[in-house]
Image: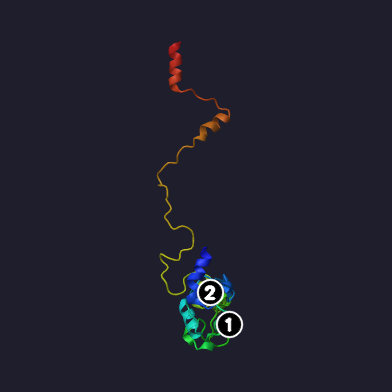
Amino acid sequence: MNALAWFLFRILPRDSDLSALEYRHILRISGKDIDGSKKIIVGLSIVKGIGYNIAQVMLQSLNINPYIRVGFVTESELKEIELTIKDPSRVGIPAWYLNRRKDMDTGSDKHLVTSDLDFTISNDIEREKSVMSWRGYRHMFGLKVRGQHTRTSGRKAGAVGVKRLTKPGAAAPAAPAAAATSTAAGSTPVKPATQATAGEANK
């Protein structure tokens, strides 16, 4: 028995009435590919903007077992999940569960996911910058916005350390190439004193 057959044999009786042939290895939810072997509550949490708690509330509101595998979710259940992600209020999820309450443009309560969430956050930051609020000012200079300390954290520029300085009275070391430069210029090299003394002694 291979690994896939063993996996289907273990989870099929307690997860779903579907046959092994209807198992899907990858399921697309809200534009995100979800592994079919994951539990549906964990699979929904992979979608950006949906956490574990709101995923559990959605599945309970739809009467879907949160511990079935994603590969065994039926088409009707998948459609209900997609509609609930777009409009959680349709199944009675309270407004304080949503991540976009009292929107600046519409004034309504919404729940944003995936690229819509990223786009809205970037628009909020640009609006703060354009009105030159204090939050926008901090965003402009790349500083922390929520009142954190910045003395020892949030340093984004290079390495932090102390530069070693030379002592003022210390003489610079002689350049070893100075003698070679003078020889190349045509000056006659001077014999060492020890060699001259030895030559005079031989005479």
Q: Which mark is residue 33?
A: none
Residue indicated by mark 1: 76
Q: Is residue 149 above or below residue 92?
A: above
> Taking 68 as reference, is 6 above or below it?
above
The x, y position of residue 182, in whole percent, is: 54, 31
In the rendered view, tell whether residue 2 sits above or below residue 116.
above
User: Coloring scheme of the render?
Assistant: rainbow
Identify the amino acid type marked 1.
Answer: Ser
Q: Residues within 10 Å of mark 2 (few under 14, many from 20)?
A: many
Could you say where residue 96 lies in the image, as x and y percent from the top left?
47, 85
Check the image and name the residue furthest to the top. Answer: 203
Which of 155/5 is in front? 5
Residue 89 or residue 160, whichever sits in front: 89
At a point 46% along the width and 15% down the height, the residue shown is 199
Q: Secondary structure at mark 2?
A: helix
The residue lying at 49 percent from left, 76 percent from top is 15
Q: Amino acid at mark 2?
A: Val
Residue 45: in sight, yes or no?
A: no
Crowd around label 1: few <14 · some 14–19 · many ≥20 (10 Å) = few
Residue 7 shows in the view:
yes
> Which residue position is annotated with label 2?
70
Which is more toward the observer, 140 or 26? 26
Q: Residue at x 47, y 73 (%)?
A: 145
